[in-house]
Image (cartoon, rainbow, N blue to C red):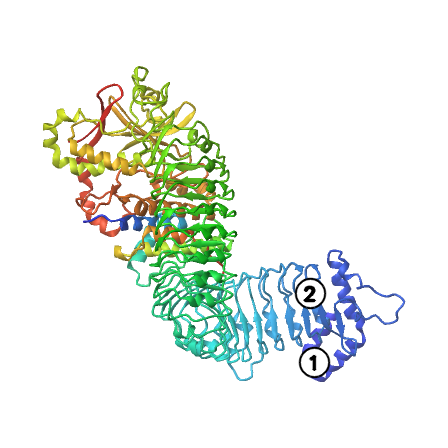
Amino acid sequence: MSSHTTWLAKAIPATLVLLLALSQGISGLTQAEALLKWKQSLPDQPILGSWVINSSATTQTPCSWRGITCDSQGTVTIINLAYTGLAGTLQNLNLSVFPNLLRLDLKVNNLTGSIPQNIGVLSKLQFLDLSTNYLNGTLPLSIANLTQVFELDVSRNDISGVLDPGLFPDGSDNPKSGLIGIRNLLFQDTLLGGRIPNEIGNIRNLTLLALDGNNFDGPIPPSLGNCTHLSILRMPQNKLSGPIPPSIGKLTNLTDVRLFSNNLNGTVPQEFGNLSSLIVLHLAENNFVGGLPPEVCKSGKLVNFSAAFNSFTGPIPRSLRDCPSLYRVRLEYNRLTGFADQDFGVYPNLTYMDFSHNRVEGELTANWGACENLQYLSMAGNGVSGTIPSEIFQLDQLQELDLSSNQISGEIPPQIGNSSLYELNLSGNKLSGMVPVEIGKLSNLRSLDLSMNMLLGPIPKQIGDISNLQNLNLSNNNFNGSIPYQVGNLASLQDFLDFSYNALSGEIPSDLGKLSNLVSLNISHNNLSGPIPNSLSKMVSLSAINLSNNNLEGPVPEGGIFNSSHPVDLSNNKNLCGNIQSLQPCNGSLTKPDGGGSSNKKKVVIPIVASLGGALIVSLVCVGIVFFCYKRKSRARRQKSSIKKLNPFSIWYFNGRVVYGDIIEATNNFDNKYCIGEGALGKVYKAEMKGQVYAVKKLKCDAENLDTESIKAFQHEVEAMSETRHRNIVKLYGFCSEGMHTFLIYEYMNRGNLADMLRDDKDALELDWSKRVDIVKGVASALSYMHHDCAPPLIHRDISSKNILLSSDLSAHVSDFGTARFLKPNSPIWTSFAGTYGYAAPGDLVSLLFIFEISFVKFWFKLVSKTKSKFLVVLATD
Amino acid sequence: MAVTEKCDVFSFGVLAFEVLTGKHPGDLVSYIQTSSEQKINFKEILDPRLLPPSKNNILKDLALIANLALSCLQTNPQSRPTMRYIAQFLEMDSADI
């Protein structure tokens, strides 16, 4: 009957409508009944406990029920059940009996189902808030009848579909339908998408438009420039493209503009700078080019400004200097130019400032110390010079300071001890002098990176007082003296401790063994001497250790990391011995390792290499040297006899026990059924030996001659490369040569290569987004290591998904270095195309013609036994 | 011709797109090489076999990877970023705006 009434109301002239409305006001029963009918359709919930028929009363009105408000005639005007935990759907709420409803507020509940199609019958409605529920379906077109609504919010629901142009007024002077009266329109975090209709600009009084976090694409409607009352414009995290319409720059009432995380491009309207009310401007994570608005802080009220991760060029806006209202500023990762000492002022409210990775020069000034509320300051990756002002450490709110990769010089001021920093990164500068002992007072510090400076003197023992430190990197400085035993007190150390590339001497303090949470320890490239303390084998969390390039001697401790499959680099020490990887076993008296190898090793082949790097080198050098050898071939022959007197290689053992016979046996004499792949230098076989699985690459090799110089070059390269270790580079255990065969023994990667994984629909699903992100990060990390942390730099030349192997946890390992080569300033230019077609850079393809060349250049190693424990590598070309 | 590390950077860009799209991105690469706009909507190229990423931080990571990969494919090797730049960028936590 009630729907019948509404039908009449629509069809009959206005006078009758009035009469009907009155009659409904009198008969509140209809409204009470409608509400009760809805209540009955909902799951039982105490919040509607007051919604009952009072049998003793003569008239039944819902006006005293919870959430219901009536006018003086007893007609319901407000339904407000916000924040009540209401569950169920709106399908059984007969909206048509509430013609006088002004407000419907159901926000923050558990409503499901769709928005009623006939919601448009609430023609007097002024306020509709359904936000933060589980409503789905599309927006009913009848919303266009809600011409009186000034606020509409359906944010945070699962509403899908598009914004129909019919929801908005047409462009005429007296539009009949559409959200004519709307002032605040909020569709945040829904599943709405498609274009934003240009008709939205016909809403004359629009002051707040919030479309955050949807799937809207296409351009920002230029018609928004007609909404002269617009104050808040939020469209971040959509897929909007194209430039910002210049018309928007003229909306002088704008206070809050958020456009971050879209695909917007072009230049930002310079008029943005003239907006005299601007408080928030977010342009980050788009593809903007050109300059920032020069007068961005003309309002003097700018609080929050982000332009990070675009391609902005030009100067840092002058207007930012005199902008004391600033609270949070993000400009990182652009190509902005400017001067750190001229373009920034004093900001009493500033908490966050990041202009890292731009092209800012100038000096660090004490001004930063006057920004009393600063919590985060990063200017990494610029050209900032000068010294660190002590004032910066007076900032008692400052938690993170990143000045890395600049040109900052001078000493670290002792006032550093006054600060309450959590993270401090000063790496990659020109800091000199000693580290002040006050550093020990940084009791909050979690991460300290002073690497790649020119710091000298002893490491202060007070560093052991930084009790919360989780990462410590002092590498690549000139620190000398011994490692203070107090470092062992840093019980929170977790990710890494890196003292490599310094001039530290003395013995390794056994206290380091107390660092039971430490994962990676690197004290390589120092002058440390004496034995490796037994305590290091007790570090239960340790999964990588590098003690190489020191003067360590004596037996390597048994157990722990030293007998694990984790990366252990002990190369280039004085006289270490033990039953592991590259070392000579200690004999009875633990002295000279020389006499050790012997009669029981008849068939043992010689594992060269041991370290990953070594491995690489072998194959690398193979390639690298071919050229070299080729030229020297004839001379090599003449010098053949002299070669045999050399013993340029330390002998690496492959766990000291793998023998040629084991490999032959494990692969059934290289039966094809064990073949798991083919690389540039030969086939790869899966071999299970002594319970462990390995990948054995059999090189296509035979023997020839080599001259002394080549061997020396090879030796140097092997030495250099023996440091190459990286969690994302496949590990080489050893090198082995005997009789007809020469092979490299690698870590076995049981998930095969990335190309196969991606090709298989089932496997591809296993590679979810987060694993894929990790794979890309892993490969990037490995390549960064090869290019920038190896000396000389190492170029792979054949990065492709076939050469990325996946371990059981699906982490990426770069493999197949058969075509890699070292990059040396004076090396002959290598012309052969080495890559995989489709991955090679265009320039490389020019040399595709040369791909055949490499197949003519055959080369390999052969280990020639001179005595039972001494071998030579012979490399040759044919 | 000289071999520089920028060749690896290019290959890395191709590889990164392959991981995002799930297949060898030959078409995409040639499109990028010939297109003057030098931009793509990364959400449209994502491997259709997987559900679209739901977490914001993954979405950010993927967008970053797409952008970095794009810069790796520039024709002029000198314009490509270094692997150190890329690796550091990828390791950075993307703080809230």
Q: Amino acid at mark 2?
A: Ala
- Marks 1 and 2 share the same chain: yes
Question: Residue visible at 33% across and 43% down?
Answer: A503
Residue toward you, A291 or A769 = A291
| Depth order, front residue of A17/A545 | A545
For this view, does A848 lie left or right of residue A745?
left
Local secondary structure at mark 2: loop
Up the image or down, A626 lies above or below A151; here it is above
Does label 1 or label 2 sit earlier along the sequence? 1
Given residues A811 and A611, the one toward you in this image is A611
Q: Residue at x 22, y 34 (%)?
A: A714
Task: Name the quarter where the C terminus of chain A is drawn.
Answer: top left
The quadrant holding residue A377 is bottom left
Indicate the quadrant containing the N terminus of chain A: top left, top right, bottom left or bottom right. Answer: bottom right
Mark 1 element type: loop
- Residue A142 seen from this side: no
